[in-house]
Amino acid sequence: MDKMRQVRRGKDAMDRDWADPELDLDTVAAHAGYSRYHFIRAFKEAYGETPGQYLTHRRMDRAEDLLRTANLSVTEICHLVGFSSVGTFSARFKAWTGLTPSEYRHKHVGRGAALIPGCYAMLWAGGFRSGPGAGPRRQRNSGEAG
């Protein structure tokens, strides 16, 4: 298998599972058939950024979208985009946009976009889990990697 195809397999894993807070570099590198360090180098060479930067960009883009369009709390959005800590999410969001999530929402809401009720956004994003402390939203088959 050629190098670019292998790197693309890792990127595809991130594109598919970007909202999973348990997604880690070792899992993504394994999808590509690389060690974590080799994968970081190959990914950066192919895409101009590290896998961690790419994943953060995916999550921040989705968070921006949800803050503009969904009637969800910052905490709910934090968890929907794959962060387990609101503090980490808020710090990364501010570094990404220059605004806190609340400031971003205040600046962008009401500019022609209606807010989607939170229950619909949560249902669409797969955010409803059954029972307290329920596991990941996506169940994997026992033979599936990752």
Image (tube, rainbow, N blue to C red):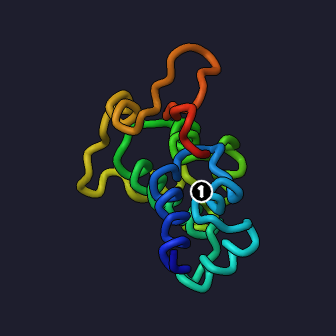
- Rendering quarter of residue 93: bottom right
Determine whether 29 is above or below 50 in the image.
Answer: above
Q: Residue furthest front?
A: 1
59 horizontally vs 113: left or right: right
Q: Residue at x 37, y 42 (%)?
A: 70
Q: Residue at x 34, y 48 (%)?
A: 69
Considering depth in this image, is 27 or 91 the residue closer to the camera?
27
Q: Is residue 112 visible?
A: yes
Q: Is residue 99 visible?
A: no
Figure quadrant of the C terminus: top right
Question: Is disc 1 surrounded by few (<14), some (14 to 19) or many (20+) residues within 10 Å?
Answer: some
Determine whether 82 is above or below 44 in the image.
Answer: above
Q: Residue at x 65, y 58 (%)?
A: 30
Measured from the top left, where is residue 40 in percent x and y?
Answer: 68, 74
Considering depth in this image, is 136 or 1 the residue closer to the camera?
1
Measured from the top left, where is residue 119 in percent x and y?
Answer: 37, 27
Q: Which residue is mark 1?
A: 100
